[in-house]
Amino acid sequence: MRDVPPPAPQQQPARPLGGSLALVGFALVVAASLFPWSKFGGSARAFGAWRVQGSLAAALAGVVGTGVAVLARLRPFDPRLEAAAYGALAIVAGLGSNAGHRHPPLLSVATHWPLLGVAGAAIALVGAVAMAASLLGLGRATRKRRTRPVS
């Protein structure tokens, strides 16, 4: 009789791509919210995005997105839910940052920091799309090639 080979060590399943991009994008949104988002008025100070207006949605979405990305790294959960959360939060952060740039407070002029928030939200959205694409298998050739019969 032969000895049974020892069981192979179980490898952790590979995480889909895009989580790191989403983390960087949301961290960029949070970093942009630390700077003044307008040149005059109440938003013309540090943490200028943290006022009750459209920019608050961007700042909160950036913080929640960063939290979800860190939590997913520490304790992985369903990647489909993770990709959907990244996508939704990136859209909210992008729209809020755009609103903060397009509609500054009354009698003030917007700075360029909200555009950094838009860029961070775009990076996070690319991460969400990359994660969704890797979950669906769109990034690699998974189909068998059809061969033509030789005549």
Image: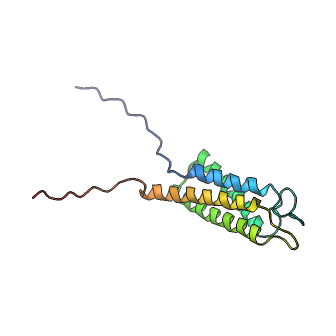
Q: How many marks?
A: 0
Structure colour scheme: rainbow
Image location of residue 83, percent across then percent down: 55, 59
Residue 26 falls in which quadrant of the image?
bottom right
Residue depicted at x 75% and y 71%: 102
**Left of 66 or right of it: where is 125?**
left
Image location of residue 68, percent across then percent down: 64, 54
**Left of 116 or right of it: where is 150?**
left
Quadrant of the drawing holding the C terminus: bottom left
Residue depicted at x 84% and y 71%: 105
**Left of 95 or right of it: where is 86?**
left
Residue 29 falls in which quadrant of the image?
bottom right
Quadrant of the drawing holding the N terminus: top left
Residue depicted at x 50% and y 51%: 16
Which residue reaches farthest left? 151
Name above or below for residue 85 compared with residue 67: below
Image location of residue 144, percent across then percent down: 28, 55
Residue depicted at x 59% and y 51%: 21
